[in-house]
Image (tube, rainbow, N blue to C red):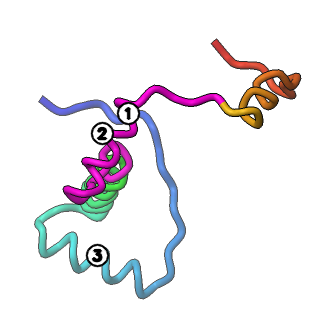
Amino acid sequence: MSTVKEDRLQIRVNPADKALLERAAAASHLNVSSFVVQAAALKAEEVLAERSSIRLSTEAAAAFSEALEKPAQVNDRLAAALRRTRKFTWLD
């Protein structure tokens, strides 16, 4: 069963890039639109996955865990910052 596609994405490319995409699409047995959408979706997932996880060395992970376990210390500078009037409001 095919999905109805209602949204349109338009891009401009130079002739060399278009030819490259056409060759790659043909080699993949896809039309250019399908090839570009698949390639872009894979890259989008990769980019978003990189931003949702953090890789730490063993030493960095231990330091991070230790910092999370220690209660925060409020010094004079932080206390003063917390007392200042905010120039923004939180969106709930």
Residue sitting at x 19%, y 56%: 58
N-terminal of the two: label 3 or label 1? 3
**How many angstroms separate mark 1 from mark 2 (CA)?**
5 Å
Q: Element at badge 1?
A: helix
Q: Element at badge 3?
A: helix
**Lateral position of residue 7 relative to residue 74, left or right:** left
Number of residues whose C-alpha sits closer than 10 Å to that of mark 2, classed few (under 14), some (14–19) or many (20 or more): few
Q: Element at badge 2?
A: helix
Q: Residue furthest top?
A: 92
- Residue with the mark numbered 2: 65
* Placement of the C terminus among the 4 image quadrants: top right
Q: Nearer the viewer, residue 6 or 57?
A: 57
Discs 2, 3 touching: Cβ within 8 Å = no
- Residue with the mark numbered 3: 22
- Residue with the mark numbered 1: 68
Residue sitting at x 76%, y 24%: 82
**Lateral position of residue 86 relative to residue 26, left or right:** right
Magenta region, main secondary structure: helix
Q: Residue furthest bottom?
A: 16
**Amino acid type of the residue that numbered disc 2 sits on in the rendered structure:** Ser
Residue 26 horizontal/vertical position (percent): 17, 73
Q: Which residues are magenta?
A: 50-74
* Placement of the N terminus among the 4 image quadrants: top left
